[in-house]
Image: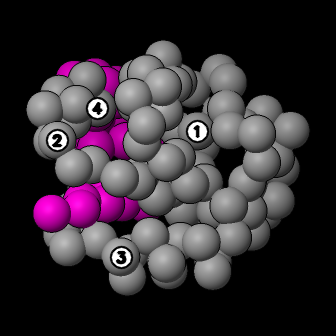
Amino acid sequence: MATAVILNTNQMGHGDRELGLKILATCLRKLVSIPDLRSIVLYNSGVHLATTDSPVAVELRQLRENGVDILPCGTCADYYKLTDRLITRRPSNMDEIVAALRDADKVITL
């Protein structure tokens, strides 16, 4: 059962940013326990998480090394002027994002 995770903000939950980043990092480390995790989609301010200086860059790189597609929205990266700092080789596009969501049996939004 293919799973996709959506990160649409630059932290997990609402409230204190430091706490939101701390629990997000822990959550990303635990996502390896989802055997069929196929993709992590990042859009809107969530695209900040997929940059080289992100507090969760290490966790996202580890997931990528484990075969998970990391899909930061290109339009969002352009908007926030982050394209040259993404941890992926290139930004994603809406066709790829929609395909990842379409092909997933389960979509989790954090």
Between tags 3 and 4, which lies in front?
3
Q: Residue at x 59, y 72 (%)?
A: 96
Residue that label 2 marks: 35
Q: Which amino acid, mark 2?
A: Pro
Categorize mark 2 by other alpha carbons within 10 Å: few (<14), some (14-19), many (20+): few
Question: Is residue 78 inside the magenta stretch?
Answer: no
Q: Percent position (x, y) of residue 15? A: 25, 44
- Residue 93 is labelled as none
Q: Is residue 100 above or below residue 42?
A: below
> Looking at the picture, which amino acid does disc 3 mark?
Asp
Mark 1 vs mark 3: give the one in front: 3
The residue carrying mark 1 is 50
Q: Are marks 2 and 1 in contact (CB under 8 Å)?
A: no
Distance from the alpha carbon under mark 2 to that under mark 4: 13 Å
Q: Please state which of residues 110 and 92 is positioned toward the viewer in this rendering.
A: 92
Crowd around label 4: few <14 · some 14–19 · many ≥20 (10 Å): some
Q: Quadrant of the C terminus?
A: bottom left
Q: Callout 1: few (<14), some (14-19), or many (20+) C-alpha neighbours within 10 Å?
A: many
State left or right for residue 89 relative to residue 87.
Answer: right
Q: Camera-side residue: 11 or 73?
A: 73
Is 5 in the magenta? yes
Marker disc for residue 103: 3
* Cβ atoms at labels 2 and 4 below 8 Å apart: no
Q: CA distance from mark 3 to mark 4?
A: 21 Å
Disc 4 marks which residue? Answer: 28
Per the model, the C-alpha gap separating discs 2 and 1 is: 22 Å
